[in-house]
Amino acid sequence: MNRDLYIDFAKGLATLSIIFIHTVFWSGQFYIIPELRVFSLVFDVALFYALSGITSGSNIEKTFYRLLKLQITYMIFVTLLFFLDYFFKIFGLTFFSLEWLQKIYSTFGSKYAATSISTVPQWQNLGNWYLHEYSNADTFPVVMGSFWYLKVYFILTVFGVLILRFFPKHVNWFIGICIALTLIFNIFPELYPNGQVGYVAFYMTVFLVANRLKGKTIPGKIIPVLYALVAAALLWMFWYFGNEIFFKINKQKFPPKIPYIIWTLFSLTTLFVLYNRLKITKENFVTHIGKNAIFFYFGQGISSSLVYFLVVPMKELMPWWILMILIYVINVILAFIIATGLKKFDSFGWKILEFLRLKTASQ
């Protein structure tokens, strides 16, 4: 079966969009205007959940095997991250000083400045990372700030495949339940639960709707109606919540509330409209990113942390928009280099695990 290059292309564009979002929202806090930071959220993480829905099926064994591979790849990555963070601190304390390290970490801003730096490995942090409790990695703060997506993805995929496998005739009912829960949580905010429930209620809707559209093409005559509904929803949002809601979109994202949900409708509609309509016939740079999206997602967390050290000294030297373009291009290049290295390191990690498996297997 031939690989659908549109899916890879869409994943690649979504990944490049995430890199842009993390460029303007992290180091960009020092120099980029708020309006552009909000507009960057138009093409956001909801696209990944939609693409996952399109590519998912009812094969539990295949899905769980894919999730297991992803979990191991994730554990290999955070193990590398743990030691990079630890060895950098040892390097700083050995050749420089605690004050030097604290000055380095202060580059990220007071919220992420490390105040307690130990020469003893904090093994509990590594264990927590394995179990998807994302305590901060001082040297690379953007990494753990990005990983909320991964926990929701695991939960979503497990419940999604169970629904598709055991309730294939009632998928629309589950979509209705998720929409109803999302509306109830927003209409009665005192009922909005902590934890992952709010995330899963909305993103499960996206996942299941995308799965229902798998292999289908949205009729051309419906497209203007869909975009008209998106425009009407945006107009209602600004009328009901006021124009100031524009600057609060990011705060409406964790967990997703009505303004952020409406904000994502344009990108989701565009994804579904172009599905089976836009034909990608040749592999290219964007499809390469899409094929290796998880390594780029890991890599951009590191690269988006590193560009802080360019932004701080350069932000007074040129107009903000030129610096933004420059930093974004550098961020993409760094993410590409790091992702390539992480893919090779992942392969090395799997070889070690295979060696251990062979050595410990029963004869």
Image: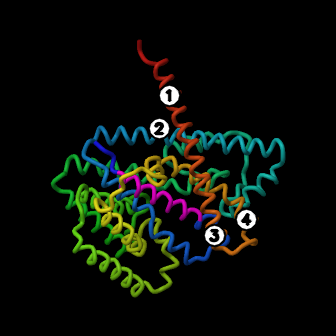
State the CA–CA distance, disc 4 to disc 2.
Answer: 36 Å
Q: Nearer the viewer, residue 33 or 139?
A: 33
The residue indicated by pointer 1 is 353
The crowd level at tag 4 (other Cα within 10 Å; few <14, some 14-19, many 20+) is: some
Are discs 2 and 3 less than 8 Å apart at CB? no
Vertical placement of residue 68 versus 282, above or below: above
The residue indicated by pointer 3 is 29
Identify the residue at the far top of this view: 363
Residue type beneath disc 3: Gln
Between disc 4 and disc 2, the foreground one is 4
> Which of the two discs, 4 and 2, labels the residue nearer the N terminus?
2
State the CA–CA distance, disc 1 to disc 3.
Answer: 41 Å
Vertical placement of residue 11 versus 228, above or below: above
> Which of the two discs, 4 and 1, labels the residue nearer the N terminus?
4
- Identify the mark at residue 312; answer none if there is no mark: 4
Q: Position of residue 161 (x, y in %)?
A: 28, 48
Please identify the quarter of the rendering in which residue 87 is found.
top right
- Magenta residues? 5-23
> Which of the two discs, 2 and 3, labels the residue nearer the N terminus?
3
Q: Nearer the viewer, residue 182 or 71?
A: 71
